[in-house]
Image (spheres, rainbow, N blue to C red):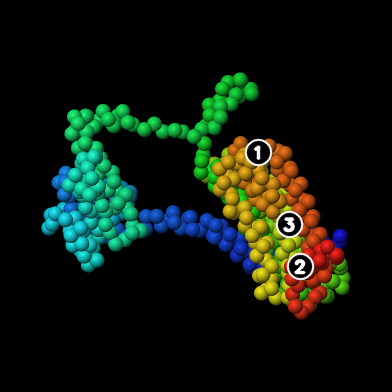
Amino acid sequence: MRKTLVVAMREYQAAVRTKAFLVSLIAMPVISLGGVLLQTMLRDRVDVTDKRIAVVDYSGKLFGAIDSATKLRNESDIFEGEGSARRQIKPRFLFEQVTPSSADPQAVSLELSERVRKKEIFAYVLIGSEVVNPAADEATAFVNYHSNSPTYDDVQDWLRDPVNARLHELRFAAVHIDPAIVQEATKNMPVDNLGLVSIDPATGEIIKAEKTNEMANIFIPMGLMMLMFMVVMIGAAPLMQSVLEEKTNRIAEVLLGSLGPFELMMGKLIGMVGVSLTIVTIYLLGAYIAIHRAGYGVLFPAHLVWWFALFQCLAVIMFGSLFIAIGAAVNDMREAQNLVTPVMVLVVFPLFVWFNVIREPSSSFALAFSLFPPATPMLMVLRQAVPPGIPIWQPILGAVLVVLTTLLFVFAAGRIFRVGILMQGKGPKFGEMVRWVLRG
């Protein structure tokens, strides 16, 4: 045991004292959150060049409403801030009415398409002559937006409101109905997402249900799952390369002169468990401080910290033993890549089903997949983090299953490690590795 702990301490110190470890601590949040933060910072960094749009209104009844709404938008909606800090964050939409040169919309559309290609205008809109009549044929009742920028849909999205508002006014007027009455009668009622009502045990008074924070209920469980996934990749996956390097450089032969193969393997696993716990402690502590300073301390899942640490350690040992076995069995990285694919499928499997699990954490589907041992650490923590949680017997059963699976993986990896660590030459096939496990 003492030799195992010596190896574990050596592996731990070799990992945390490197610059790569510090870089990985910074790189993890950058990789996972950098895209979101960058998109948030750049959401208003857009091209504010004027967008000129030609309008051919065969009905003669909609351009006025579009023009009025555009002027209001260009005066207020495209700016941010007040006074000297006021700045433009969206482009102006400049609609110009075009008299059609033909009664055929296709001929006019061809002319305007050429203007778009020559960059004289950004886009154009065609409005059918019978667009006000809801019973008219589609050949005469249409509003078509044409552009050469299919991914830029701001004009199209904005155009819907003024066009439809004016159409409603005209159609109500045609049947002598006051639009204000219709708007009041058809006013939508929001449906709030609330929790459950409870009773104060001290006073016996009924406590009103609080509004559910939908974003927190999704992103906090997802964040815990992603943290576990990244720590497994940082802590367990490098074990394969570490063992392979020691084998090819004949370092393993020297180490095995002082301790047994199983002691060496367990020392490496325990060392990586220490590394993973160090990473998790840093991130959870940082998240705790940040959330409390932001005034959302109630959202931090403190009740899950110990469960998270338990499943994290089991996941690192379970997957780490597989990576160690592969590193010991092969002779180069090319052979390792062929064997590591099935293991990587098991590691990333929870990422394939997490959304279905988080939507209905109490369903039979979620329970079944969270009791599949390779997926249990990530999916069980995910389910526990979604209010109101799950029955205590489920994470206990999941932990027992993971412990049994981990012992099985460690046993199998120990036998493969004992045979493969000193072997040279042609790498073994999968069937041969199975025989090592069964026969020792």
x and y percentages locating residue 125 in the rendered image: 23, 53
x and y percentages locating residue 276 in the rendered image: 69, 57
Classify mark 2: helix, strand or loop: helix
Displayed quadrant of residue 438: bottom right
x and y percentages locating residue 306 in the rendered image: 70, 46
Going from N to C along the chain, the mark reached first, 2 or 3, is 3
Q: CA distance from mark 1 to mark 3?
A: 24 Å
Question: What residue is shown with label 1?
Answer: 390
Residue found 58% across the figure and 53% down from its top? 352
Going from N to C along the chain, the mark reached first, 2 or 1, is 1
Q: Quadrant of the N terminus?
A: bottom right
Question: What residue is shown with label 2?
Answer: 431
151 or 431: which is nearer to us? Answer: 431
The mark tally for this picture is 3
Q: Quadrant of the C terminus?
A: bottom right
Classify mark 1: helix, strand or loop: loop
Classify mark 3: helix, strand or loop: helix
The amino acid type, in three-letter code, at marker 3 is Met
The amino acid type, in three-letter code, at marker 1 is Ile
Residue found 52% across the figure and 56% down from its top? 33
Residue depth check, mark 2 versus mark 1: number of the one nearer the observer: 2
